[in-house]
Amino acid sequence: MRRAHRIAAITKTLVERPNHVFAVGDFVELFDVARSTLSEDLAIIRATFNALNMGKIETIAGAVGGVRYVPHLTKDQVRTSIEEVCARLREPERILPGGLLYIDDLISSPSLLSTVGSIFATAFGDRDPEYVVTVETAGIPVALQVAHALDVPLVVVRRQSRPTEGPVLTMNFLSGSARQVETMSLSRRALPEGGRVLLIDDFMKAGGTLRGLSDLMGEFACTVVGKGVLIETGWPEEKLIDDHLPLVYLREVDVKEQKVTVEPADWILS
Amino acid sequence: MRRAHRIAAITKTLVERPNHVFAVGDFVELFDVARSTLSEDLAIIRATFNALNMGKIETIAGAVGGVRYVPHLTKDQVRTSIEEVCARLREPERILPGGLLYIDDLISSPSLLSTVGSIFATAFGDRDPEYVVTVETAGIPVALQVAHALDVPLVVVRRQSRPTEGPVLTMNFLSGSARQVETMSLSRRALPEGGRVLLIDDFMKAGGTLRGLSDLMGEFACTVVGKGVLIETGWPEEKLIDDHLPLVYLREVDVKEQKVTVEPADWILS
């Protein structure tokens, strides 16, 4: 195989599984080329990705030697993507009675979810999360794409436990907006003690769910290395957590004027 | 940019969004090369993917002209992947009291889910599904990766509807194994009439859920073009549906002997 062919095959392998470290030796063997030749192949892919802002190619030194593709969006790319999400959220036909917003179509688009996954991977990747944790149901697609971008397992906390989970730890928590006592539970097998977890959810009002998830992680002796939410609402003003990273800030839904006021989160605009 | 650089960039773009048609003209513009040069680039990627069984590169003729990456696993690749899943399912520590099996870690692995997504995309892609439909909760990660591989939206049917869904259609159905009446509901906005849908679930016993999902699709005047399940159990013997495609066949869980009898589905072995 010539260089161009090798580069197609290597790029495909790396991009299909972001953040996974592939042994350079496996490529050397597959293509039956010198290690120095393969290093040149990787240098070309790296230079291309750098030039076009397509993420990073990182080589890991050492006896074995590895290489991985690390998703990385520039600030401009993040801003453009999130501006597009905001534009779609402004569509007045999303407004439901009571000032609620229909967003299921957004969190059902695989390509949008991939982008969101890459944004959170860019933001939290250097904190080395070992698990992405969310709570059923709407957070799952977002969290899975974050887990995919980071190459770590997804852990889904349940509202109600199922018999196939084995022994579970169940916890009550106070939902921040409705001030109701709700329940979440997680299988004892789902997370080992001492794990580093990234919490991801689709929607946050007061932050009661993320607060509850954090407390649950404490029961598993896990460390929360970050908290990401796709959409945060402007109400209520007082939040139960303060160290989370939102992508979209939903300021107001005006039913009378049929107007949605929404913008990218401050850190994206700054 | 030289050929090797262009190939890295094009491969990355195509692989990151399977089954999405990209305009060839956009690449021509981005790299400022002749159309014939770009066709040669694409031919190299296509030849490489063919030679290494990495899926297909399809070009779409016409005034605009497009190109897409179509995931495609060979029979051997499918068999190897599913044999691996079976080997993991045989681990005796998965056996829970009552002969249940803990599988949450399997359906939480992004790389396994990607492979499963590609297998179902290979099996159902030529039926041109426009939506992938599943029911919460455990089916969501599997279904999302199928939707990603097919570049179509994911639609999640709920056990209980939420206020943010707008008007919903609610239906009772008979769960096949427990013979209980259960409920599923779907937002009227989630699916247009006449859509072509692919049903995906993680686990099937009698098939009551997939039977119910099919009936619900009828209420939306949608056509079910296929039904895929990751794991089908050998019990009960009588199934409520017969035109589904399982990947793994779970024959028996013997609690006393601590033995799981599981194998790839017949169509994979034949």
Image: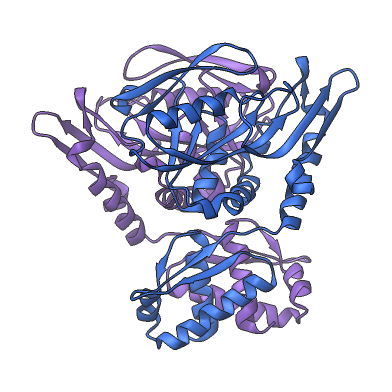
Chain colours: A blue, B purple
Can residue B37 be seen in the rendering of this structure? yes
Kindly indicate the quadrant of the structure image that contains residue B227. top left
Say how many tags the image has.
0
Q: In the image, what residue occupies the spot 61% across and 34% down? A: A202
> Would residue A184 be found to the left or right of residue B6 on screen?
left
Name the spot of residue B5 as percent of width and height, x first.
Answer: 63, 79
Q: Is residue B97 above or below residue B268?
A: above
Q: Is residue A164 above or below residue B78?
A: above
Can residue B242 be seen in the rendering of this structure? no
Name the spot of residue A163 as percent of width and height, x first.
Answer: 31, 22
Name the spot of residue B163 as percent of width and height, x first.
Answer: 65, 17
Q: Nearer the viewer, residue B17 or A225?
A: A225
Kindly indicate the quadrant of the structure image that contains residue B236. top left
Q: In the image, what residue occupies the spot 35% across and 60% down? A: B77
Residue farthest along the right direction in this orientation: A257
> Would residue A44 be found to the left or right of residue B139 on screen?
right
Q: In the image, what residue occupies the spot 34% across and 74% down? A: A64
Name the spot of residue B215 as percent of width and height, x first.
Answer: 51, 23
Q: Nearer the viewer, residue A97 or B38?
A: A97
